[in-house]
Every structure is written in C-alpha cells, then in structure tokens.
Amino acid sequence: MHMGTTSPFPFSFRLYLNYIGSVYQDFYCRQFMTKNSPAEIAWIGSCQIALQFLLGFPVGKAFDAGYFHHLMIVGSLIYCFSLWMLSLAKPNQSSSPRASVWASVWASPSSPALGVASHHFSRRRGLAIGIITTGRFNLNFVRARILSRMKGASIGGIIFPIMLNNLLFRHGFAVGVRATAALISGLLLLANLLMSPRYPKNQPVSKTSLRSTLTDLPYMTFVISGIFIMLGLFYPIFYLQLYAMKQGIPEEIAFDTITLINTGGVVGRLAPSFLALRIGNFNVIIPIVFCAAACVLAMLAFTLKSGGIIVISLLYGAMNAGYVSISPALMADLSNDRSEVGIRMGIWFTITAAAALGGQPLSGALIMGNFRWSTIFSGLCLVFAGLLSILSQFLFLRRKNPRDGGHGRRF
C-alpha cells in the first residue's frame, strides 16, 4: 500500500498490497470479513506498510554494505511463502491478517531495490526511475541492464486490479490469491536473476554518522513531510472503490477505480520525470503533493457521479505516481554522496512507519458512513506535507548558496 520502484520485487509487493489495496479493502468489507468495521480491516494494510518501512534503517545499512542480493533472496523466498499461506485463509478468521502482515515483514529486506537506479544514474535519475516504474524504456537512457529487463508498476497496476477483482468476486478468495501469488513468484525469480547494483570501486566505508544525518535540516524536513504523506496519500487507494460503491456508482466503474488510478500513473511516472530534468525535483514534487490534496478533497462532492469518479481516479493516479517516481531521486539529491542513499532512504522509511501504521485505520474510523471527515483529514495532511516540502526546498537551496559556505544549518 506504497510507492514505485526499480525492480519486480518492490513492484510485486507495492502493487499487490498498495495498488490493489482498495480491491482487498472492498472485498474484505463486503464479503470476506463482514464482522469487522472498515477501520479494523484497514489495520491489515496499514501494518503491511508500517512493517515494510520499519526495517528500513538496518536494511539500508546492509544495502550500503553490499548485501543487496542477500536481502533480495531472503525477502523473496519468505514473501512468496507468505502469499501462498494467505490463500488458505477462511472468511472471518484471523489467519488472513497474520499472513498478510508476515509477508510485509519479509518484503522489507527487498526495499533497497529503490536505491539501485541511483547507482546507475547520476544525472537523469528521476527520469530513469519514472521510465523503469512505467514499464517503458528509451534506449538513449539505458545505461543499466535492469532498465530494459524490468516490468513497470503502472502497467502492471492496470492489469492486476482487473484480474484480482474478477478472480475474487467470481472464483473466490483462494483462487484469486493463488493466481496473483504465482505471477508474483515468477516476477521475483526474474528480479533475482537480472538485477545487479553498481557499487563504487574501492568504496570507502561511509563516515557519515547517524547523528549528522538526523540533524541535516533539509533532509529531516522532507522526512517529516513524508509522515503526513503517509497519513494522506494512500486514502484513495484503500477506500476509493468502497467509496464509489457507497455512492451508488455502477459496479463495473467502481471496480475499475484502481485500474484508472494506475492508468493515470502511466503518465504520472513519465511526465514529471521529464519536467524534473528542466526545473528540478523539488519544483515538480511540491505541485504534485498539492494536486494530490486537491484530488482527495474533491471527494467531498457527495453528488459525484461516474464521470467525477473517473476524473478523480485518473488525476490522483498521475499525482500519486509522480510522487513515487520523484521522491527517490529527491532523496538521493539530499544525500551528500551515493554511498548514503541506502541509509537515508532507510531512515526515511523507518521514521514514516508510525504514520503508515495509524493512517488508514484513523481514516477508516473517521468515515462514519459519509466519508466526509476522513476525506478532510487526508486532504489536509497532504496540504501540510506540501508546505513542509516547500520549507525543505528553501533550506536545501540555502545550504547550496555559496554565501552560506555550502554548509547550511543543522538542528
């Protein structure tokens, strides 16, 4: 229930848990876990996000130390096993959340795949990540083998929700989960065979201390903005399909909301990446966050019909994907050198884990039948995240100003 990547593993995990999160939320609420409230069911997805992020710091350290393939193999094996076990769950039993959460814990070791693109691309990093996560590539930018061999999150995100909705509601939970688990297992096998990091030759051990990282003002301001992103950005992914059904939207359109989100994501992963080459990552990601807030707050129009749901889904998908594509590149920009990318991403994930844990259950508790307060809460969280991103940009530019000696201020 999270952001784009450079490999099939995070693609599989985030697509399976994030981009089809609304499919599962709707299915659990209306058929599979009818004895539980939406807020209680949302704990499944929020625990998956939080536990994946919680191990970010130690995993980031291991990634920087050269253990990328070890992390991928261990995470892939146990994650696949957990998905197959999930298919054995029965309605209104606790085995479903246990298997889902267990899968998320072991998906964490493969999160460093986010940093692989940063090893291969120094200048057009944001564009590379956008192309990789869309499933398209331009040979002019293929400097890494992984780019031409990986599947894209947005393209797969169009296919998976359609497949899962049809399998779950027509053939049952077990068949749906087993089919997606089989596909994900194949993608993970390819990922482990084809991916390769590019560590600097004779790379010295990073002397950056944890204290210096945590007192880096521009970086930590952006990390804090990520907390509010986690509270608000995933709201439509969890609840838009259920919201559409409650609004009386025709079932065939309601079932396609996640597919529409990922269709918008195809454009959202490429266009912002090209734009970032010209005007910078900060100047792209800040408008994206505010536009995402506008899309969420537009759900307050309770007279929203099919056309409105389609427009919101497409626009939100573009903004969500844009943030996913630009944020890893921006995190690399905020690092002093590429040897710090893994640990800085890991700290980012670990700190935002608490918000990821409580965000969607809190939104679910605020639904109260009409989705009004949950929508306001999520939208305002995104607005505040945008304001913090502006502050982070100001501090970052101030640090780069020669008059400041290039040092900037720290906490």
Image (cartoon, rainbow, N blue to C red):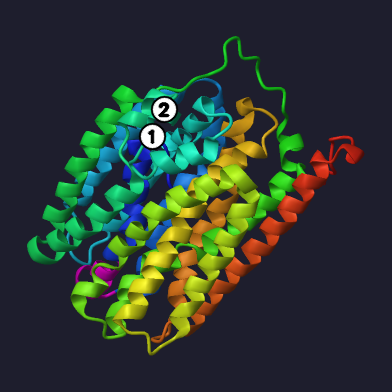
Q: Reply above or below: 358 against 116.
A: below
Single out the residue that lies furthest toward the top.
202
Does 286 appear above or below 51? below
The dominant secondary structure in magenta is helix
Q: Is residue 88 above or below residue 34?
A: above
Hey, what amino acid is under mark 2? Val
Q: Nearer the viewer, residue 96 or 410?
A: 410
User: What secondary structure is marked by label 2?
Assistant: loop
| Highlighted range, magenta | 25-35
Identity of the residue drawn at 39% across and 43% down: 133
Residue 78 highlighted magenta (yes or no): no
* Image-based side of 51 in relation to 218, left or right: left
Task: Tally the numbered discs.
Answer: 2
Residue positioned most to the bottom? 303
Q: In this view of the protein, can residue 44 be seen by the observer?
A: yes
Question: Seen in the image, is 113 located left or right of residue 310?
Answer: right
Q: Please, which residue is most extreme toward the right here?
A: 403
Q: Which residue is mark 1?
A: 138
Residue beneath disc 2? 142
Dividing the picture into quarters, in which one does residue 140 lie?
top left
Q: Would residue 62 be seen by someone viewing this image from the given angle?
A: no
Looking at the picture, how far across and down is residue 112, in whole percent? Answer: 47, 34
